[in-house]
Amino acid sequence: MILIIYAHPYPQHSHANRKMLERATTLPDVEVRSLYELYPDFNIDIAAEQEAVSRADLIIWQHPMQWYSMPPLMKLWIDKVLSHGWAYGRGGTALHGKNVMWAVTTGGGEGHFELGDHPGFDILGQPLQATALYCGMKWLPSFAIHFTFVCDENTLDVQAELYKQRLADWQETNHG
Ligand SMILES: Cc1cc2nc3c(=O)[nH]c(=O)nc-3n(C[C@H](O)[C@H](O)[C@H](O)COP(=O)(O)O)c2cc1C
């Protein structure tokens, strides 16, 4: 099962992420947990989240980039759900061997992340990658849609289809 942990503060105003989800959910065995719709009060049901994660073979952290980082409910989800004794530490093996992918949309192009001394786009995924590796997960190449501020609908459709194809390829490779 592919589990998309989706953190968009205003899902009803999304263009890029909404198209990605529309395409991805045409595949079988894809579940979406839209955190801002499930938890508008930020009161995350940790047991429900851990139960969903336990059933997943591939977990996707999908969100729009906000100030070079993730929306706050995504961070809170990591803080609360990846708990000691479950995700790490003594007896914390629930995530071992699971795959994880970062799927992110950005308003700027890749050049936007190379301003001044900034070392570029890929390094922004490192906190998530380090978290995944610390919990014994396998980090897959990330998926990004850049330039969402200027992309027309057709370009977004093409990108969303590429996203779906990435997931379909993963399903075929991992489950025949
Ligand atoms: C508070 C806030 C901060 C943002 N910070 C960034 C940023 O640091 N870099 C960037 O490229 N885009 C930034 N954006 C633009 C969003 O990433 C962009 O609007 C989003 O990826 C579009 O996806 P959507 O159509 O699903 O909303 C920011 C947007 C908001 C609202």
Image (spheres, rainbow, N blue to C red):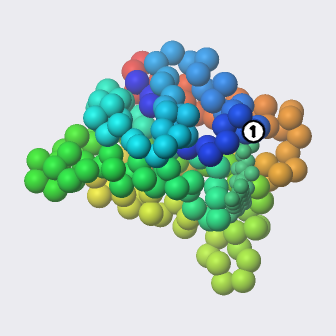
- Asked if 48 appears above or below 175 in the picture, the reply is below
Frontmost residue, 139 versus 112: 112
Q: Amino acid at mark 1?
A: His
Location of residue 77 in the rendering, given as x and y in whole percent from the top left corner: 41, 48
Residue 144 is at least partly visible in this image:
no
Number of numbered discs on residues: 1
Residue 81 is at least partly visible in this image:
yes
**Residue at the left extreme?**
90
**Where does label 1 land, which residue?**
13
Ligand 1 shows up in the quarter that is bottom right
Location of residue 146 in the rendering, given as x and y in whole percent from the top left corner: 74, 52
Taking the spot 83% from the left edge, 38% from the top edge, the residue there is: 155
Residue 68: quarter of image: bottom right
Taking the spot 79% from the left edge, 48% from the top edge, the residue there is: 148
Q: Circle 1 — which element?
A: helix
Location of residue 58 in the rendering, given as x and y in whole percent from the top left corner: 41, 34
Taking the spot 49% from the left edge, 23% from the top edge, the residue there is: 30
- 171 displayed left or right of 80: right
